[in-house]
Every structure is written in C-alpha cells, then in structure tokens.
C-alpha cells in the first residue's frame, strides 16, 4: 500500500508542475495575508525579553539560552496553553504539552508511541489526511479505515470495527480524527458523534488523536466544543499547529497529553515522557528560534490569534461562498447526481460526481480544461471514494475559484454528454 | 537495553540539576560566543533578498514563499554545498543534499531507511554518541558495537564482526562513525583506518554514516580529509550540522547522499528519495525560517564559517590546553594507571582511571567534590568501558576546567589511598 499511496501523491505533484497555469484546487496551503517575515525579528526580541524578565536574567543571557540546545518538550508551553484556553476553550497546563517540529512530528510520535506491540493498529476516518497514512506506513503500523455512511452511526461502526479487529488478534490503540472541517472532506462531527466516539474509545482504551488545524477558521454555524473539552476519562491527545494561524515555515506544533490517560495519571505521565524521549532521538528539540517567533507573536497579540487571522478567515469565507455559488451555477441542473457539502469553515469541500475521477481525469482536466483537483481516492485507505474530489479553496483568489469551477463544469458536462 | 540507556541519561540530567554548583564536564554544548540572536532578522532578510534576486521575484513575494510550506529537501542546499566545499573540501551538488531538522533527524532517517528488513543491523564504534543509540533503539534496530583495541586493526575487526553477524543471519547495513574528534572519546581516525574502513564497507555494501560536527574545530596537527572525499564507490553518507558552527537552536543539519551508492547511480537516487519521503511524514520540511538564518549567515560570511567560529575555536583550544596541564598536574604521578588522550580538536577528552566510575562515583564526585563527569559506560553499547570518563571541555571557562580537574584529583586520590 505504501508505495501506491506515495506514487499517487508524486503523480499529483508532477501534474501540478507540468500544468502551472491550471487553476489548482489541489493544494490546501493557507493564504499568505498575515505572513510577515519582517516581524519575525521583533517577535524573537519580544519573547527574549519575556524570558529574561521571567527568569530574572539579562536580555543577552536569555538570548544565549535561546540559541542553545533546549528542553525537549519546549519553551513556549505556557503561552501555548494560554492561547488554547482563550481561543479554543481548552484547559491544559504547560506540563501537558510537548512542542513538536510541526504537527506532523506530533502525529508520527503519537502513532509510534501508542502502537508499540505487534498487532497494534491505528483507526482513521476514511478518507483521511495523507500525513497520518504516511506516518503509519513508514512506522510499519497498519491503519484501519472507519467508514461511517449516512445511514450508520459512529457508535455501532466503531464497535463493529473493534470487534472485527479483535477476532483478527489486532488491537486498535488510537483513532485519528479532525472533528472540525476535516481534511479532506470539510465536514464537522456533531455533538452526538463526538460523545459517541468518546464513549466507545474510553470503553476500549483507544486514544483519540484530535487534530485541529482548521478549528479557528469557522465561517458560520454554531461553534462546537473541541473533543478534548468533552473528555472525562483522558482519551484525547489534542494536536495543535501554528501552520495555519501563523505560518507553515515555523514548523511549530504540539501534542497535549491528558492529565489522566484512561483515568490513570501515571499512565498519562508515562505517555508524555515517552513522547518526549522518542522526540529527543528524532529531532532533539523543536527549534527555539521558531518557538520564539510563536511565543513573541502570542505575547504581542495578548494570547489570542483571533484578530491576526481575521483577514484570512474573511478570505476563506468569501472563497467558500464563491465556490458554493459557482457549484450551484454549474451543477444545479444535475443536483441528483452531483453532490457537495457546505463547509462551515476550513479549507476543503467534497464534491461527488456520477463517474469515477482518477488519474486519467486529473490529466484530462489539467491538459484540456486548465483545472486541477485531487481525487478523493488518493486519500482513501481502501478502494473507495472513487467518484469524489477534494476541492481546496484556501489559496486561490475568489475569481480563480469561480473560473476553476466553470472549467470543471465544462469537463463534467462533456463527460456526461 | 533501551530503558537502561535512557535511564542512565535521565540519572545524569537529574544529577546535573541536583548539583547546579558542581563544575560540569558532562555537557558537550558549544560555547555561546558567536550566538547572536540580534543578527537572525538580518540573516533572514539577506537570504530573502538572495532568493528574490535568484528567482526574479519581488522581495515580498520571496518572503511569502519563505513563510509557506517548502520543499522537503530544503531551500539552502546550494549554499550548504558551497560551504562544505570551501570549509571541508567536500565536492557535492545541491541535489545530493537533504536538509534535516538538526543532524539528529538525519541520523534517524538514515538508520530507518537503510535498515528496512528484519535482520538489518547498524554498526557503531564503541562507545558511541547517544543520539545514534537512541534512534536505533526507538526504531527497533539492533546496534552492534565495534571495539578496535590498540593491538587490533579496523580491517580485521570489521571483517570479523561482519562474518560473525552473517552466521547469525544478520546483515550490517550501515556503520556510524565520527572520524574527527569523536563524541565521546575525542579521537581521530588516521588515514590507514579511514582507507581500511572504506575498503571493507564498500566490499560488503555497508553505508558509512560520517557524522562530522567537530571537524571545523581542529586545534593542531595535520588536517585529515573527510572520509567522503576518499570514497570512490559511494559508501559514505555525510552528515552535517550547523549546531556547533552557528547555534543549536537553528536545528538545521543535512544528509549528503553520494551520487552513486556502491557504484550505482540509480540506487543513490532511490536512497535520497526514500530519505526525503520518510522525512515528509516525520517533519514535512525543515523550518524555512531557520534555513534562511543559515543561508543568510553563509551569504554574509561569503560561504565560509571559518572566521565566524575563530573565537570559539580559540576558546576550545585554550580549554584543551588548560585541561591537559591540569590532568598532568593532578595525575602525572600515577601516569601508569591514569591515562588520557590528547585531543587535537573537538569538545571531548577520554580519561581512564584504575577503578570503575559509575553512578555511585558520579554522585560522590558531585556531592562531596563539586565536579560532574560522564561515565563512558553510559555511552557504551555493551558492558565495557567501565573505568573511563568523558570530559567535555567546550562550555566551561578555563578557570573552571582547571578547578574541576583539581576537584576530580582530590576524589581520585582519596579513592586510591
């Protein structure tokens, strides 16, 4: 499976560079409005001053410490805890946090640490983020798809999957989820789903890896509580990232380990220490330069990133609206065969066509219609989701979104005629 | 073995924090002379200007790209290749380089990639750097000690080890080495040893991981060519780091993959691509912020770090001299029982005592004599090296080096009396 998955992503990267003029819905990059490289130096100084004051150190001494090897678990943990509290309503303390070299490292660390024995497997909603699939593949850990169809519920599907695995001698150790504006589908788990998942996972001692890169980017609808805030037994390891709220180049993420793991405080400490030890032999510690930029920015913004991300949030909302209008315009006459969701936030929308959309269709769209999109099957953990596309609307101008869907419309109508 | 190794390092960390006033020869941190956090902003601007000019971009556009997700293999590869050429005499091109989140990530990536099958093992000189031991342990890969005693030669010891492993159904896939001023022993491999190792490894298709963090810090003696420059068949993966020449907080290292791997260009490309793919699911890409600081500094220094590191080099040389004088003063009357090497560079010296130096001795030295040192057995891959110590002299003032050895002298004489 590993090589196959990588090869489809390579195929997409090649298509992207072979057709540079195609409007691309393939890349889920954040927009660059608030990327201010000229503020990085100020942010570092701000954090250095904060550290100096906190430790009763001279400014230069704080700088020397900052430039040295640092604590494996990080140096901005307090500020991260504060921001998670203010912006996400998450209560945690600095000692629960392992700062990582991007959220990808947190995913890789959690998967390898939780699945340490033969037969340990990871569950993931199908389709899922390629980063978790790749990390599991390279760690030699099986990733088991969880498909919850509209007529089913999470509780029974999860219970069924766990029972099926048990019979095969396999033990699910973690469930990877993006409850808010999932990559790739753009969907949100409702309260009943969140509660059900927590119940089943706590009962079966399955850790939930709650990845939340898009939670701050809600356009409308009621705000949902992060699963970690609903967690009574210590099932949830919350994964945070500053790649979307600040910028990807920082490569700063975090894993927030619960205070009790399945109601056991000692297990939780052991898990945190094992994540930390594993990290120390993977990347030693997260760059204190980029941690200082995160820390300094959080200080300058008084602990909340809400106002900093406002222009980007507006941009994503406008793009979502343009996308929905364009889809309605192009495909409403086929509304029984062509379906899409209405994302309440995030970067992605899922489009379902009445025919398979795979490699051949990617090339045809790019070459003859000037538009690129990602087949959902590239992100599927099995042979499913062949008629779906992931449309990323985050890093395009609104006019491009509109024009891209127009082009896709031409392709679809041609194929259907 | 894993938990045991980690526990001794935890023990040492605890001892270090329990006895903060003890003179510590335990930490091999670089000295902070050239740590200039106030220059980081300038370095980023310098690199951003360079990229803008190179790509014919506006300065702000180059900044936006810099703040985004980046190429997995890095963006400062050309500048690194240039510096390796000027400062280390290593010929390589940008495409051979995978920039990593510190050299530790390069080690972890190489080990996991090269040892992909059951029975694949890593060889390492005994004792060895804890980072390679830990990375192998966490990847579940056996690390086999290579001990070359003064009466033996590398060629026969390596051949014997390989043959012994072959009989056990094991296959050595890589040999980890620090040929210049080894951590922990401070020793240097001579030309005959380098040639012998290259010959045996090329014959048996064993990759050499040549780690070279200290090569730029030679105090005296003739400069030795890096093993990669002697490599005719493509055995050597060269590992570079900017933690000692610039500063550890950058977390920028690199793996330089040969153009042919055991005389095969396709294998070399495949290896580089697999390192890169594995990295993409571990840390995605190395922070472009810290890459920009490395790049901007290399531009400002016109491609060579020699003059930037001069004050540190002088400091290390002085400390080495003070250390040698102090050792001679304290222990010369026992010269037949207490032995040490004379490091020609680097951060470490190896001291051999006529009694075992373990946990109990660490505590006794710290508590009663105000001096901390690292038992070499903590870094050994087997039950050996029990009477040796690693003395790190890099991050102390010369007076501390002198006083620390005086204190160690009191302890040793007390023990011997």
Image (cartoon, coloured by chain):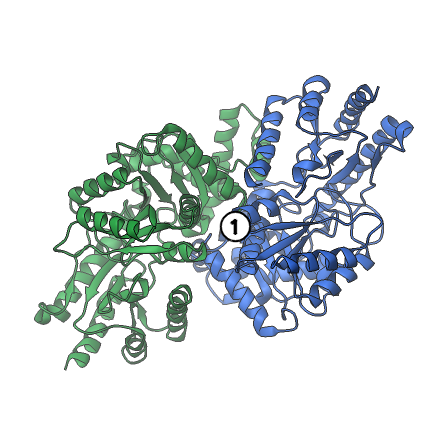
Chain colours: A blue, B green
Q: Residue at x 53, y 42 (%)?
A: B280
User: Split into 4 quadrants, where in the image is the N terminus of chain A?
Assistant: top right
Q: Is residue B158 above or below residue A113?
A: above
Please state the horizontal and vertical placement of residue B115, each as a whole percent of the image: 41, 47
Residue extending furthest toward the right: A333
Q: Residue at x 80, y 31 (%)?
A: A353
Please state the horizontal and vertical placement of residue B43, each as a whole percent of the image: 46, 40
Counting every numbered tag in the picture gives: 1
- From where the camera sits, is residue B285 visible? no
Q: Residue at x 54, y 69 (%)?
A: A270
- Chain label for disc 1: A
Please state the horizontal and vertical placement of residue B113, each as a whole percent of the image: 43, 44
- Is residue A312 left or right of B351 when viewed as pictured? right
Please state the horizontal and vertical placement of residue A407, each as a whole percent of the image: 77, 22
Residue extending furthest toward the front: A167
Q: Is residue B256 above or below residue A145?
A: above
Q: A169 or B309: nearer the eye? A: A169
Secondary structure at numbered mark 1: loop
- Is residue B228 left or right of B271 when viewed as pictured? left
Residue extending furthest toward the top: A368
- Quickly name the residue at label 1: A139
User: Split into 4 quadrants, where in the image is the C terminus of chain A?
Assistant: top right
């Amino acid at each position: 499976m590993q090589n196959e998955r990588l090869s489809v992503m390579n195929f997409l990267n090649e298509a992207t560079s072979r057709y540079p003029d195609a409007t691309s819905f393939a890349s889920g990059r954040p927009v660059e409005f608030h990327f201010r490289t000229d503020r990085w130096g100020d942010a570092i100084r701000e954090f250095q001053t904060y550290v100096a004051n906190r430790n009763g150190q001279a400014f230069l001494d704080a700088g020397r410490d900052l430039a040295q090897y640092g604590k494996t678990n990080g140096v901005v943990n307090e500020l991260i805890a504060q921001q998670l509290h203010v912006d996400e309503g998450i209560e945690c303390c600095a000692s629960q946090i392992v700062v990582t070299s991007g959220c990808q490292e947190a995913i890789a660390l959690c998967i390898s640490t939780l699945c340490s024995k033969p037969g340990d497997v990871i569950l993931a909603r199908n389709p899922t983020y390629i980063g978790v699939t790749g990390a599991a593949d390279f760690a030699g850990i099986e990733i088991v798809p969880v498909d919850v169809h509209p007529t089913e519920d999470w509780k029974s599907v999860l219970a069924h999957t766990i029972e099926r695995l048990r019979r095969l001698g396999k033990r699910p150790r973690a469930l990877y989820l993006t409850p808010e504006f999932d990559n790739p589908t753009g969907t949100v788990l409702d309260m009943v789903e969140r509660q059900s998942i927590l119940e089943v996972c706590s009962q079966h001692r399955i850790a939930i890896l709650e990845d939340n890169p898009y939670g701050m980017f809600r356009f409308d609808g009621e705000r949902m509580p992060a699963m970690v805030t609903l967690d009574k037994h210590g099932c949830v390891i919350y994964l945070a990232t500053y790649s979307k709220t600040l910028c990807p180049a920082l490569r700063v993420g975090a894993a927030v380990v619960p205070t009790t793991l399945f109601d056991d405080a000692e297990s939780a400490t052991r898990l945190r220490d094992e994540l930390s030890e594993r990290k120390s032999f993977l990347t030693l510690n997260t760059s204190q330069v980029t941690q200082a930029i995160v820390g300094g920015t959080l200080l300058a913004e008084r602990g909340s990133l809400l106002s900093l991300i406002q222009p980007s949030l507006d941009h994503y909302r406008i793009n979502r609206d343009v996308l929905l209008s364009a889809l309605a315009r192009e495909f409403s006459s086929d509304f029984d065969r062509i379906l899409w969701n209405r994302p309440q936030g995030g970067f992605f929308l899922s489009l379902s066509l009445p025919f398979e959309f795979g490699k051949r269709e990617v090339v045809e769209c790019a070459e003859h219609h000037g538009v690129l999109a990602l087949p959902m099957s590239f992100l599927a953990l099995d042979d499913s989701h062949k008629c779906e596309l992931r449309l990323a609307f985050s890093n395009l101008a609104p006019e491009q979104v509109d024009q891209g869907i127009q082009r896709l419309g031409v392709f679809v109508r041609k194929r259907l005629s």
